[in-house]
Image (spheres, grey):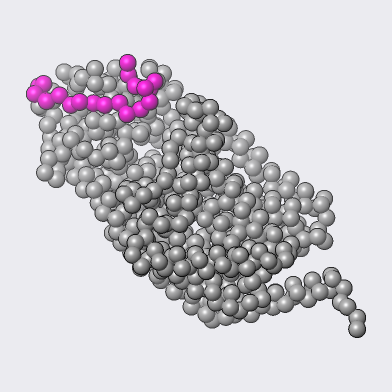
């Protein structure tokens, strides 16, 4: 009896897996599962459709309103501080602002749609990587419903991540095609997709890392020369990105990340904070209660058992590729986050504010997808050959997804309620400003007594983003007793003397405190309590009283009321 050659056995096995994958794609239960997950996610998300904007959301909308040319961010600094180059993301914000304006429900719908598109792209990639449509749908379902993905979707400002992720996975899908067929066409198709992802957010560098991993670990019949050539091609857009970025973002304030700690110290703290915070966000243990903890524990236990069984199975090239592609995506994400996370921890507890849960989810968005891909790759042999394992992993996924969705629903409600605090203040400010007479020059508007740090942080952008007649207030400076993160205003020149009681952050150096954007400027200003309010000031002072803003300008000018201004920036940036 003759024995089949090893290569023939391998070809037969691959053909069988491909046939299973094709049959799986025709399985009606796949569509039913996908539709059910999408409907469940929309139901969990529904509270967000009555939510308002929060923090940087106002900034993105305000910047879009000041941009007459939506392509300007490709060659001009477009986010204050000189840290980020995301021109495609800003173009998408411009399009959504022009199309939807300040309709918050429509903006949230855009975010949810992008998240679902990202989950679909992840499904497509994982299905091909693991040669199993069911592995793809389960990974996509867990990604879509996990509180990390849900929290990232809730904050409108995380739209950069939501845009970068599907583009990245579409690019990875083409790279995977190259790793199995040596198709040069696939690499050239991957290039614009990965580049578009990178222009959406720098987190796309993780997709380039995963792409190079797939190229280097390609099937044996692909020569090393072709593998290295593909990696070299993928390096071209990365080099171009950093070259253009260095020209467009010359602002030295980007160096401030390294001004508090030494780079190695920052790296160690950043990776440590990412790992501990990532564990909290991944397990969601603090956010589950009652039976939901038991269900999640049971689901994780089933997965762990199947992982232990999988350790006894042989490692195929494609299984290794799946695990390495997922882990490289996850690990590179951690490396990209360390400069920011080195300065603060993102651990969560039962008492964590809803803003922390939502805003910090973005640090783990792409890494969650990579982690799930790695798990699917590790489980490939038992899922391929053991029907009981497929049933078990489907059951475990259900045990996890249901508690996650309930946690998501609660998160959406809490976040909506938090945004309503902003909405009350912003709408009252718009109403009061609309009734007030504004000075023709050196227009300043002070919104006093709000006692809300989030509003104080974004008061200027909030008014500029939502005021119906932008031309009327685009030259005004708006703030509470605490200077916002930045102002955005139309000012051709700055008269430091006319700013009082405000001052330029870096002394009288306008070049270091002003950055052009469209027809406006980003202004880095502070409030100086020692200067006080000039006697001839024409500033408008509005006090928050019983749910509305009341004009107290006369009291301030006559000395019957003295606003107490505070500097919230680093000590070296505060007035001496």
**Magenta part, dominant SS:** loop
Residue at the right extreme, as displayed: 2
Taking the image as drawn, is residue 213 in sight?
Answer: yes
Displayed quadrant of residue 433: top left
Identify which residue, 300 or 111, lies in the foreground. 300
Q: Residue at x 43, y 65 (%)?
A: 296
Taking the image as drawn, is residue 153 in sight?
Answer: no
Q: Residue at x 15, y 24 (%)?
A: 562
Q: Work out whether 570 lies above or below 237.
A: above
* Quadrant of image for the C terminus: top left
* Quadrant of image for the N terminus: bottom right
Quick check: 553 left or right of 420?
left
Displayed quadrant of residue 63: top left
- Residue 112 magenta: no
| The residue stretch that appears in magenta | 558-576
Q: Residue at x 17, y 31 (%)?
A: 541
Q: Position of residue 292 (x, y in %)?
A: 37, 66
Q: Position of residue 546 (x, y in %)?
A: 11, 44
Identify which residue, 433 or 245, lies in the foreground. 245
Q: Work out whether 456 lies above or below 354.
A: above
Disc count in the image? 0
Q: Residue at x 28, y 25 (%)?
A: 527
């Amino acid at each position: 009896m003759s024995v089949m050659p090893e290569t023939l056995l391998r070809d037969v096995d691959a053909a069988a897996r491909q046939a299973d994958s094709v049959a799986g794609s025709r399985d009606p239960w796949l569509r039913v599962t996908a539709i059910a997950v999408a409907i469940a996610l929309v139901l969990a998300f529904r509270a967000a459709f009555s939510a308002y904007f929060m923090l940087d959301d106002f900034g993105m909308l305000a910047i879009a309103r000041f941009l007459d040319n939506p392509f300007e961010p490709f060659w001009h600094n477009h986010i204050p501080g000189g840290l980020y180059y995301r021109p495609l993301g800003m173009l998408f914000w411009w399009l959504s602002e022009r199309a939807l304006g300040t309709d918050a429900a429509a903006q949230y719908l855009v975010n949810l749609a992008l998240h679902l598109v990202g989950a679909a792209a992840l499904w497509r990639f994982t299905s091909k990587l693991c040669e199993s449509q069911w592995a793809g749908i389960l990974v996509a379902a867990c990604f879509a419903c996990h509180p990390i993905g849900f929290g990232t979707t809730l904050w409108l400002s995380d739209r950069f991540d939501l845009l970068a992720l599907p583009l990245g996975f579409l690019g990875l899908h083409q790279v995977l095609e190259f790793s199995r067929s040596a198709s040069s066409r696939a690499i050239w198709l991957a290039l614009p997709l990965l580049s578009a992802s990178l222009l959406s957010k720098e987190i796309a560098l993780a997709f380039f890392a995963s792409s190079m991993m797939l190229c280097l670990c390609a099937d044996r019949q692909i020569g090393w020369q072709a593998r290295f050539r593909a990696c070299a091609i993928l390096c071209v857009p990365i080099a171009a990105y950093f070259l253009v970025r260095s020209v467009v973002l010359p602002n030295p304030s980007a160096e401030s990340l390294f001004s508090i700690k030494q780079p190695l110290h920052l790296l160690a703290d950043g990776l440590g904070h990412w790992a501990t915070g990532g564990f909290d966000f991944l397990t969601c243990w603090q956010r589950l209660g009652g039976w939901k903890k038991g269900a999640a524990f049971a689901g994780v236990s089933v997965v762990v058992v199947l992982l232990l069984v999988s350790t006894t199975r042989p490692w195929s090239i494609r299984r290794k590729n799946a695990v390495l592609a997922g882990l490289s995506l996850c690990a590179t994400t951690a490396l990209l986050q360390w400069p920011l996370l080195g300065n603060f921890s993102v651990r969560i507890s039962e008492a964590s504010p809803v803003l922390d849960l939502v805003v910090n989810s973005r640090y783990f968005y792409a890494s969650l997808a990579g982690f799930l891909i790695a798990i699917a790759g590790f489980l490939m042999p038992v899922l391929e050959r053991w029907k009981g394992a497929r049933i078990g992993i489907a059951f475990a996924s259900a045990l996890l997804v249901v508690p996650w969705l309930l946690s998501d629903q609660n998160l959406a409600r809490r976040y909506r309620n938090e945004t309503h605090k902003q909405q009350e203040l912003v709408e009252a400010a718009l109403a009061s400003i609309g009734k007030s007479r504004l000075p023709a020059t050196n227009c300043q508007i002070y919104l006093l007594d709000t006692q809300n740090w989030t509003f104080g942080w974004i008061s200027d952008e909030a008014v500029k983003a939502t005021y119906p007649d932008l031309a009327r207030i685009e030259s005004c400076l708006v703030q509470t007793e605490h200077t916002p993160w930045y102002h955005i205003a139309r000012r051709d020149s700055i008269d430091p003397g006319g700013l009082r009681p405000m001052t330029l952050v870096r002394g009288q150096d306008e070049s270091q405190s002003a950055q052009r954007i469209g027809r406006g400027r980003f202004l880095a200003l502070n409030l100086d309590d020692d200067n006080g309010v000039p006697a001839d000031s024409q500033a408008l002072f509005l006090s928050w009283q019983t749910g509305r803003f009341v004009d107290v300008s006369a009291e301030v000018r006559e000395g019957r009321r003295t606003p107490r201004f505070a500097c919230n920036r680093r000590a070296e940036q505060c007035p001496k």
